[in-house]
Image (cartoon, rainbow, N blue to C red):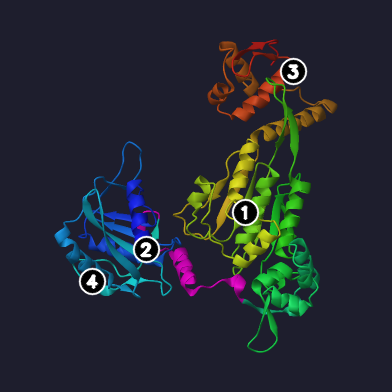
């Protein structure tokens, strides 16, 4: 990045009061040599895949108690005595000589609030991983333990085992999907799948009529082996082999579900080309898993459809698992279906800068990195991916539109385990209706062979609701939910049932009204 661009970026960061993060750090002075060296090394390793990282010397940071934000730059800035700038720059150059290999950086003198400060702009390099040396550890003025450092959020620290592996892989520029497969050849690719892909992606007619060899060459699916002949690349095997798992272990999706009427689990494996796996597992969801009820609102009298799980959520998360899987690992994509929740498990983390915390908190991932770039492009061409970095947003929106609980992504950032898990809980209104139907079926069976007189359970949810309405006829659904300790959707379900049974009647508008108890039947 050019010096002028860096200065503009620095001014914008300070003017808007940007807090410290994975590419911004503030230091009041250059005296904190150990912290400056550690952060510079971490910035150079660029674990979070940023274009550039900036360390400001002469700017103090504080926590803002009013907003709760951490590490906000203080204005006007502390600044640096202009007479000391050259000395400080020389000190920084000497300090940075303790990082190996040599890092790429720029020292830029700048002014804001009529005070001078220094920008240490660290550019991402290709020669890493970068690490500090033992001389810095032995130097009493620095005293920084030798080793590699990475930057995660505001923290410059040593990587854990999982992060260390990712760092080594990053600088090795190793992408499994781009490599030649150990055994697969052109013969192992299905010509019909290749032609179908070209038809679906509206490829030119002259490409679709090529021979298998010429078609594979034009699509970049093969390369000549050093031992002679053509070998297929791993992404070609995943996309066009009849059974990719014959060449890449565990390249399949497995749906594991509770067997109806038992406490055992049963599974279904989808093992064809991965783009067909995505289509088949979505179809399986629609045929075997998804269910819905038509529900009439007792107040507005408007009917709406409530699903156990929305299709868009399932299709986006299942496709994400397939697309973002680390196929060099011997683990399959697992989707676990239980009566009250569904769990998607992929045995690798999202690539930085996206974190598990981001997946829980954010909806847009414009800077998302892709482990399998060829697969990303091909899934996009097949319209299995709508737009880059938007799948999580659509999945979250689908759950929200269905009034379902929020998606939960795990594990925590502190957990070193290398997997990503997302749990989608069943819609509570759907579950309440389903449970009511099951209870009714059970009561109907008891009526046919009565053995013990039915026992009524005192203080049921509906009794609690009626007691609260008796005490306050203008009570809201939210107040009832908070008083009983159930969801608003659960309250809506019980109110609708009570209205249908002519026990309750709502009078007024949706904004202001009151409940009237028609019958004291519980």
Q: Gap in Å between the C-alphas at discs 4 and 3? A: 82 Å
Quadrant (top left/top right/bottom left/bottom right) for the C terminus: top right
The residue lying furthest to the left in this view is 83
The percent coordinates of residue 315 (x first, y second) are: 68, 51
Q: Gap in Å between the C-alphas at discs 2 and 1? A: 30 Å
> In the picture shown, does residue 225 fall above or below 477?
below
Element assignment for label 1? loop
The percent coordinates of residue 413 (x first, y second) are: 46, 54
Residue nearest the viewer, comparing 38 with 5: 5
The percent coordinates of residue 424 (x first, y second) are: 62, 45
Contact between marks 1 and 3 (CB within 8 A): the answer is no
Q: Gap in Å between the C-alphas at discs 3 and 2? A: 66 Å
Q: Nearer the viewer, mark 2 or mark 1?
A: 1
Q: Is 406 situated left or right of 436 in this image?
A: left
Q: Gap in Å between the C-alphas at discs 1 and 3? A: 48 Å
Residue matched to label 4: 94
Element assignment for label 4? helix
**Which numbered disc flags the more N-terminal residue, 3 or 2?**
2
Residue matched to label 3: 501
The residue lying furthest to the front in this view is 4
Contact between marks 4 and 3 (CB within 8 A): the answer is no
- Disc 3 crowd rating (10 Å Cα; few below 14, some 14-19, many 20+) is few
Residue matched to label 1: 387
Q: Gap in Å between the C-alphas at discs 1 and 4? A: 46 Å
Q: Nearer the viewer, mark 4 or mark 3?
A: 4
In this picture, which residue range is highlighted in magenta?
A: 153-179
């Amino acid at each position: 990045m050019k010096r002028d661009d860096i200065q503009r970026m620095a001014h914008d960061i300070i003017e808007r009061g940007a807090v410290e993060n994975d590419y911004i750090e503030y230091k009041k002075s250059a005296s904190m040599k150990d912290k400056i060296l550690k952060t510079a090394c971490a910035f150079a390793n660029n674990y979070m895949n940023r274009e550039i990282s900036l360390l400001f010397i002469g700017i103090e940071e504080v926590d803002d108690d009013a907003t709760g934000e951490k590490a906000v730059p203080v204005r006007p800035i502390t600044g640096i005595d202009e007479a000391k700038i050259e000395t400080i720059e020389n000190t920084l150059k000497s300090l940075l000589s303790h990082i190996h290999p040599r890092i790429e950086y720029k020292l830029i003198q700048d002014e804001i609030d009529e005070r001078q400060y220094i920008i240490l702009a660290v550019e991402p390099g290709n020669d890493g991983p970068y690490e500090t040396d033992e001389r810095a550890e032995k130097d009493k003025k620095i005293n920084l333990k030798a080793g590699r450092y990475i930057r995660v959020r505001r923290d410059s620290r040593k990587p854990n085992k999982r992060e260390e592996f990712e760092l080594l892989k990053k600088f090795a520029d190793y992408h499994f999907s781009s490599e030649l497969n150990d055994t697969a050849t052109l013969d192992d690719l299905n010509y019909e799948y290749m032609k179908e892909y070209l038809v679906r992606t509206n490829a030119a007619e002259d490409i679709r009529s090529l021979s298998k060899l010429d078609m594979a060459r034009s699509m970049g699916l093969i390369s000549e082996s050093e031992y002679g002949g053509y070998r297929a690349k791993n992404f070609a095997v995943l996309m066009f082999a009849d059974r990719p798992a014959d060449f890449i272990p565990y390249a399949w999706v497995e749906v594991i579900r509770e067997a109806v009427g038992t406490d055992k689990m049963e599974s279904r494996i989808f093992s064809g080309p991965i783009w067909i796996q995505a289509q088949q597992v979505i179809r399986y969801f629609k045929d075997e898993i998804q269910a819905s009820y038509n529900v009439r609102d007792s107040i507005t009298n408007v009917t709406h459809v409530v699903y156990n799980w929305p299709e868009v959520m399932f299709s986006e998360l299942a496709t994400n698992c397939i697309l973002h899987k680390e196929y060099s690992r011997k683990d399959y994509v697992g989707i676990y279906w239980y009566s009250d929740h569904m769990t998607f498990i992929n045995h690798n983390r999202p690539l930085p800068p996206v974190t598990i915390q981001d997946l829980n908190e954010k909806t847009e991932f414009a800077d998302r990195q892709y482990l399998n770039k060829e697969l990303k492009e091909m899934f996009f061409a097949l319209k299995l991916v709508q737009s880059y970095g938007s799948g999580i947003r659509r999945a979250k929106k689908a759950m929200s539109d269905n009034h379902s609980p929020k998606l939960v992504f795990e594990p925590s950032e502190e957990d070193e385990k290398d997997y990503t898990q997302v749990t989608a809980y069943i819609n509570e209104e759907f579950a309440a209706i389903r449970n009511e139907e099951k209870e009714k079926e059970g009561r109907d069976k008891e009526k046919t062979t009565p053995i013990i007189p039915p026992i009524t359970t005192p203080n049921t949810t509906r009794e609690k609701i009626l007691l609260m309405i008796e005490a306050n006829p203008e009570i809201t659904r939210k107040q009832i939910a908070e008083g009983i300790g159930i969801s608003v959707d659960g309250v809506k379900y019980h109110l609708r049932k009570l209205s249908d049974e002519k026990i309750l009647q709502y009078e007024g508008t949706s904004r202001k009204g009151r409940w009237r108890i028609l019958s004291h039947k519980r």
